[in-house]
Image (spheres, grey):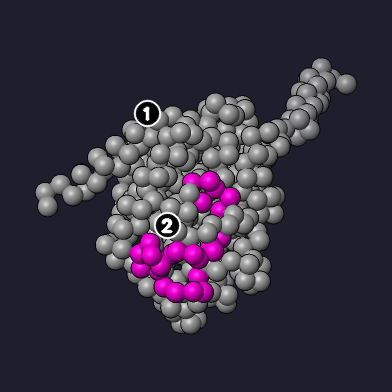
Amino acid sequence: MKKSQWFTMVALITACTFLFSGMIFAASPIKARVSLCNSPTHPQSIGMQVFKKYVEEKTKGGIQVGLYYNSQLGGERESVEQVKAGSLEMATASAGPLTTFNKKFMVLDIPFAFDSYEIAWGVLDGPMGQRLIDSSEGIGLKGLAYLENGFRHVTNNVRPINGPDDLKGIKIRTMEAPMHMENFKALGANPTPVPWTELYLTMQQKIVDGQENPLANIWEVKMYEVQKYTSLTGHIYDPMPLVANLKWFNKLSKDYQSIIKEGAVLAQNYSRFVNKAREDAIVAKLTAKGMKVNDVSAAGKEKMRLKSQGAVVAKIKASTDKKFVDEWLAAIAAMNKDVNAGF
């Protein structure tokens, strides 16, 4: 063999060795499984579909996002527990179940705190909202964004709700959230906690008279089949924080961390716009299905606020950082002032 041929063969073998070793030892895609309690058509889920597309494209497949709808991996509380333990990468959950792990999230359960979506978003996207979502790092959770769920409203089979007197004696299903129950106790109702996955069956069997949920959920779980009245009480604004296991997140490269955070904010905003834009259509559809839908006047909401908000705030202050609660309420007041400036 000529010397030149020998060098050519060595070079070829060396190149092939590197090629095949690269193929054998190429890094596998990072799995990011996300537990979602709602269907694929819920605003929160649609937002997370935007997240999946963005993250997978930006990382060129380096992160593969798996979306698991309808509580396939467990209910909200169970899913957050799995994320905290590190057996699941990510989950969304309402503030109520999150209070089991971080009591500061109770501030999101203050009834009649926000007069509009815009005011709620202003506070959540501001310094206090960031402090709240960052506060879970102490328990091993990385807060990423506030996915949309919407304002919660009351449905029941007894009568329309226009003020606190209409809630007296009504047995109402709530989330397994202590401050939600406190709110309805203060309003004279009889709250009964029932997991989301058991909601429809509970209503079908008439175990309770009514329930409370955002419009998207009222429509998705077909409350029009088992409930007569929908009253737009808007008693609690209920975002769904997206959380990740902190150790898993911190092991990602800085570039991947940035992409995850950017995708989460895109998902948050998209879910908000989808939810708000479709609510009037949901009211029309519920009415067409035979439900009697009534808006609640500002005066009616104010009567309910005076009945319940003080009692709930006192309970929250007894359970968590009093100063943080005061600063949260101050941020809401400041946002209201800015919105109403000049009028």
What residue is at 34 percent from the left and 34 percent from the top?
326
As drawn, the residue found furthest toward the top would be 3
Residue sitting at x 45%, y 39%:
315
Residue tagged by mark 1? 323
Left/right placement of residue 297 relative to residue 236 reads left
- Please determine whether, in this image, residue 114 is positioned above or below residue 85: below
Q: Nearer the viewer, mark 2 or mark 1?
A: 2
The image quadrant that residue 127 belongs to is top left
**Mark 2 surroundings: few (<14), some (14-19) or many (≥20) residues within 10 A:** many
Q: x%, y% of residue 107?
A: 42, 41
160 drawn magenta? yes
Q: Residue at x 57, y 77 (%)?
A: 225
Label 2 secondary element: loop
- The residue singled out by tag 2 in the image is 187
Locate residue 313, reporting x and y percent.
40, 41
Say which amino acid is labelled 1: Lys
Q: Is residue 26 magenta?
A: no
Image: 200 above or below 180: below
Query: Front-most of 47 and 104?
Result: 104
Picture quadrant where residue 223 is located: bottom right
* Left or right relative to 75: residue 142: left
Dot 2 or dot 1: first in sequence order is 2
Q: Position of residue 4 (x, y in %)?
A: 78, 20
Q: Which residues are magenta?
A: 156-181
